Image (tube, grey):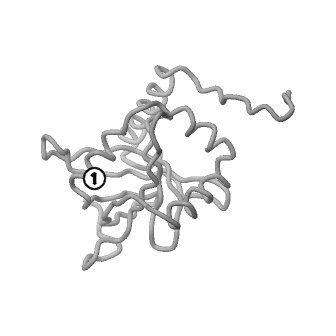
Amino acid sequence: MSLGNRAEKPRLPPRWFIRLAWWVHRRLYRVFGGRVGLWRPRANGWGALRLTTTGRRTGQRRSVIIGYFEDGPNLVSLAMNGWGDGEPAWWLNLRTHPDAVVDLAGGQRRLVRGRAATGDERSRLWTRWGEIDTNLDAYAALRSSETAVVVLEPRPGGSDTVPGS
């Protein structure tokens, strides 16, 4: 149902449901040894990867499954917290310790360095996300702060892929 020119506020599931869905997703990944839960992005869709960062307080490895698309050799994600306020822990960890590892569908592992896109690059990548998710701007408006566009680029001096461990 259209309300003319009025923009409708997007409807999100309750926070508990979003958290439960991601919890189940992570458990499926673990139970099936990484054979389920990750997928490559499609032409107009995002994929799922497993990002392992170093905890900013503990120094321990922390893993999370996030959505992404490919931009040349780079992998691009959004630092959103289920569209809720606040920065996700993985992004806070990555800002403190930018070197990380990603696991992709098919068992491929890459050494990456994370950073926030800025300026024209951010605008271009945000527009690309908007082609994948047509409600992107409306969801982002639910947050009180800007959603960072995160670029995971191949680590300088490192190989693009490394064997799984």
Q: Quadrant of residue 112?
A: bottom left
Q: Residue at x 14, y 41 (%)?
A: 57
Which quarter of the picture shows residue 13?
A: top right
Q: Secondary structure at mark 1?
A: helix
Q: Is residue 157 above or below residue 119?
A: below
Q: Position of residue 147 (x, y in %)?
A: 47, 45
Count of numbered badges drawn on the protein: 1
Residue at the spot x=46%, y=73% of the render? 73
Q: 62 or 146, which is in the foreground?
A: 146
**Neighbours of disc 1 within 10 Å: few (<14), some (14-19), many (20+):** some
Specify the farthest residue to the bottom. Answer: 157
Residue 107 locus on image (x, y percent): 40, 60
> In this orientation, which residue lies closer to the viewer: 40 or 95?
95
Q: Would residue 159 appear left or right of 61 to someone viewing this image? A: right
| Camera sees residue 76 | yes
Name the kind of residue labelled 1 in the image: Arg
Image quarter where the N terminus lies is: top right
Relative height, residue 130 to residue 14 (above, below) = below
Q: Which residue is mark 1?
A: 95
Q: Position of residue 27 (x, y in %)?
A: 39, 34
Query: Which is nearer the eye, 102 or 123?
Result: 123
Compared across the picture, whether 37 is left or right of 89 comes to: right
User: Is 103 on the left or on the right of 48, as rendered?
Assistant: left
In the rendered image of this protein, does residue 160 appear above or below residue 41?
below
Residue 36 visible from this viewpoint = no
